[in-house]
Amino acid sequence: MMNWKEKQPHAHDLMELHVEALFTHDQNMRLRSVNEPWPGEASAPRFFLGRTTDGTAICRFRHDVPEKLIAQLQELCADEPSVQDFQTKPKHLKAYMNLLQGERISTGPCYLIPQVASPSMQVISLTRSNIMEWLPKDFEWLVSEIDYAQPCVAFVRDNQVVSICRSVRITSLAHEAGLETLEPYRGRGYAAAVVAGWATAVRQIGRLPLYSTFTDNMASQSVARKLGLSFYGVNFMIF
């Protein structure tokens, strides 16, 4: 892995950072569980495919997928073309589904938040020391996560937190963003402000800020466009 502090990482490098932030791996680089920073271990998908803008694809497999099946899937993955439009489905989608007898899929675009992204509004850092001062009832669930999901950046309106962006997947190299905005306060630019503020905080601790979402999450994609995030690929998972 290159030193991105000196040079912009390639799409392939970013996709590796992405999958390693999303899931824990064993010594054979097989997927084990969702890499949530708070206690608990949800099972990882059986198959992860990361298609990138530079024409390379990364595939990972859960630890219980048979080696013979992995070999077949790897051959298909190597034939995946570059992706420029996140709505484009994998070339071998039907084959993946047939081989794995998939019941559920998840897919969406992946972005790097560039250094130039900065909050257009004043945001605050939310920690254990100040969370009760600002937290509304709809964000009470955050109390149990606040010590784990750091940095956590918030926008305050009407004397309460109305939008937050926090680290929901963490490694020593990169953090993945988790974004939440109270429904009455959506569409006002608050989400973009907290994402930019969070990204600044993540870079300050020497990590890369990554942002990914789902294909059908139009609001989240709007935030990506507003901030000019750098699109590097699309993830695709079969459970």
Image (spheres, rainbow, N blue to C red):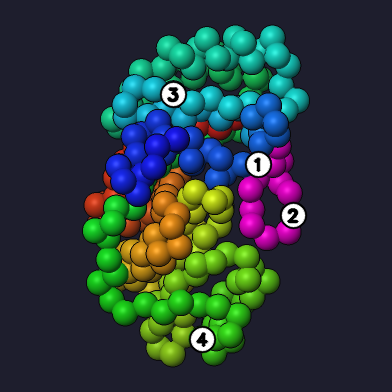
Whichever of callouts 3 and 4 sits on the residue coming sooner in the sequence is 3
Q: Residue at x 28, y 76 (%)?
A: 121
What whole-number distance in Å separates the C-alpha atoms at marks 1 and 3?
19 Å
Whichever of callouts 3 and 2 sits on the residue coming sooner in the sequence is 2
Nearest to viewer (mark 2 / mark 1) = 1
**What's the amino acid at mark 2?**
Gly
Whichever of callouts 4 and 2 sits on the residue coming sooner in the sequence is 2
Quadrant of image for the C terminus: top right
Q: Is residue 33 magenta?
A: yes
User: In this orientation, does residue 62 appear?
Assistant: no
Q: On residue 24, which mark appears? A: 1
User: In this orientation, does residue 39 appear?
Assistant: yes
Q: Which residue is drawn at 45% across and 35% down?
A: 1
Can you identify the residue that label 3 sits on?
57
What whole-number distance in Å separates the C-alpha atoms at marks 3 and 4?
43 Å
What whole-number distance in Å separates the C-alpha atoms at marks 4 and 1?
33 Å
Task: Tell me if label 3 and label 2 are in contact, CB under 8 Å.
Answer: no
Can you identify the residue that label 2 sits on?
40
Query: Main SS of the magenta segment?
Result: loop
Whichever of callouts 1 and 3 sits on the residue coming sooner in the sequence is 1
Whichever of callouts 4 and 1 sits on the residue coming sooner in the sequence is 1
| Numbered disc 4: secondary structure | helix
Q: In this view, does 82 lie to the left or right of 101?
A: left
What whole-number distance in Å separates the C-alpha atoms at marks 3 and 2?
30 Å
**What's the amino acid at mark 4?**
Trp
Disc 2: CA contacts within 10 A as few (<14), some (14-19) or many (>=20):
few
Task: Tell me if label 4 and label 2 are in contact, CB under 8 Å.
Answer: no
Considering only vertical position in the picture, is 27 above or below 160? above
